[in-house]
Image (cartoon, rainbow, N blue to C red):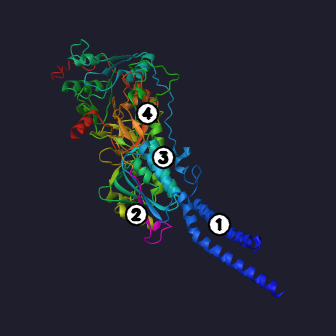
Amino acid sequence: MRASEILKPLGVFVVVIAVILAGTALVGLLGGSGAAGPADGEEIDGQSPGQFAPENVLATSAPEEGEITVDDGGENKRILVDSAHSNRYSRSDLAPLVEALAQAGHEVDFTPSTAGDGGGFGESSYNATLRGYDAVLIVQPTASFSDAETAGLSAYADGGGRIAVLAEPPQLSVGGGLSAQISEVRFGAQDLTQEFGLRMATQGLYNIEDGGNDNNYESILARPDGSSDLTEGVSNVTFDSAGYVVRTGDNAQIRMRAISGTRTLERRQVGRYPVAAQNDNFVLVADTSFLKSSELYDLDNERFVSNLLEFLVSGDKPDDVPEGSGSSGGQSSP
Amino acid sequence: MVDRSDSTGTTTVLYVIVVVVAVLIGTVLAPVVWSATQASSGDSEEPTVSVVTLRTGTDPGPVNDVKEQLRQARTNDSVEAVVLRIDSPGGAVASSEEFYLAVNRTAAQMPVVAYVEGAAASGGYFGIAPADRIFVKPSSTVGSIGVIVSAPLSTVEQAEAQSKTYLRTGPDKATMEKDQLREEMETLHNAFVDTILKHRGENLSVNRSGVAHGEAYLGPTAVRNGFADDMGDLNSAIEFAATKADGIDGDQYAVDYREPVSPSGGAIVLSKDIEAVDGNVVYVDGTGEKGTEFQDPYEFYAVWGVPVTDDAREVNNESE
């Protein structure tokens, strides 16, 4: 037998087995990688999801434009800022308002935090102190006004003095110190505001609808209700911690309402809640947060604040109002 | 002539025999080669449902572990479906988004079914949103869609009032105004809410505002309002996943329980001053003894929880 007679069949034998095994291996490897899905690093649909696109997600803040302006009106008015009723505000928050008033030639005084009988100004009585001012600004008082003070302020407004009360809904406050105690802070001047037919409601507001807030559910939007000096030039304001006012008398007028979709924080009831109201020489706004520097120029807030200051300095109060002593003992008049 | 034709015939028969024998031997050896190629990519032959378990917050360490397990499931031929067993209250937004993207990628390739063992809230729910089906039990907690920002006062209001002087090259370097912080929080919230609506929108009986409220729901409520699909247990999820998988025929499948991803230290979400080992990430006490240590100026969380206060920490320590 020649060598080729053995080698040829042997060669065929080896080639056939090699082809079969190589084919199997190839199918195995290709099939394996084919079923394993896209390799790492390969872009697949859905990994740059539409809901992540900038045009879908980007939130924008309200533009902060405009200035706070007050007309001098030719007269220099004196404005009293109440600090004697455990008021919760910081003087730095009021600084832009004081500055605008000062630029227009008006004078602003802060009452000492311990008032005493005469409001802490060395006067003989609360009414005597009030007589020296054309307007009173009361920001979130948490202590109540005495009957005499309420009567004095009532007579003050009747006689042409302007009063603006800014209030907050009930909220929790964490005290400092080692045992950080949590206490509820409540608006303390319901008796005073009720004298003017208005009360603060006991719930805060929120709005979680798309476009219904300023980037936070608590930062609600409000619009003027009808036209008035207080809302002149205002189309939208934003309040960060708004409550709402309740009318208890017929004389008060609603000046601004929260936009539709706004709800109360506790009962979740939807409604167009009144957030600013006026009764002649008395204004109640159910928020103080718009005074903060981060909110003051949002939307038309600065326009609203300007109008509020204008309201304070445009009264026409005779110097002898309110009459009498209005002592804190409760004897409101001689 | 006769001799020659005989010789040709013999040769032909020889070759036929050689080829037949070769084919037979090749056929015998082929399965060996086949399994060798399959084994080289780490697969077993039986179609498998892989059970991936996350029992901690959706923070970077645990999420990285889960991502790796999901990647292995995607690249393993025998894995035909994934069951995500989850008990997570969420965590940082950045890693919660990673979790979502990894699950979304896996769900594009094979059935993914979620079983909510404890909670799948906030970032935890972000991750399971792309699942084909979500199984819950009465005590499962799902939902809590929303974002919390945690920023030290030095970021927002007291950038200038530091106990140490530090100078910054620009007014916005490592500080932020409250307005801006809320704007960014709202942006992340939009991405989160719209992801939930994209994947669950057809099931949900609540609208976008309802989702944005951020409420957490117990299992039965979640089945009613569409945050979950069915009451069930882990086996319900595995069985459903097997039914949905193309490569699984009847009950001919294996279940592969991957190593559960759970906290190996006392990690508490939102608390940074406790030293903790969490997955692959080691959190260390942020208050160094010397030198200046920096903390993130702000951090966004998709979490179902409230910041741990000193009081709460005392209580926790006492109860341990």
At horizontal 50% and vertical 24% (from top left) the residue drawn is B171
Question: Hey, what amino acid is under mark 2?
Answer: Ile
Sequence-first disc among 3 and 4: 3
Residue B98: assigned label: 3
> Looking at the image, which is closer to me, B12 or B317?
B12
Q: Hey, which residue is sitting farthest bottom in the picture? A: B2
At mark 4, the secondary structure is loop
Front tag of 1 and 2: 1
- Which residue lies under the disc numbered 1? A23
Q: Residue B159: x, y in percent?
A: 43, 24
Question: Do the residues at discs 4 and 2 belong to one chain?
Answer: yes
In front of the other: B13 or B317: B13
Residue designated by label 2: B238
- Which chain is disc 2 placed on? B
Q: Position of residue B208 (x, y in %)?
A: 44, 51
What residue sits right under mark 4 in the picture?
Answer: B298
Q: Amino acid at mark 3?
A: Glu
In the picture, the disc for residue B49 is none
Q: Earlier in the sequence, mark 3 or mark 2?
A: 3
Is A254 left or right of A334, judged from the image as shown? right
Disc 4: which chain?
Answer: B
Q: Is residue A99 magenta?
A: no
Q: Judge whether B197 appears above or below A241 on screen.
A: below
Q: CA distance from mark 3 to mark 4?
A: 19 Å
Q: Nearer the viewer, mark 1 or mark 4?
A: 1
Residue type (three-letter) at the residue carrying disc 4 = Tyr
Q: Which quarter of the image is occupied by the C terminus of chain A?
A: top left
Q: Start and end of the magenta stretch?
A: B243-260
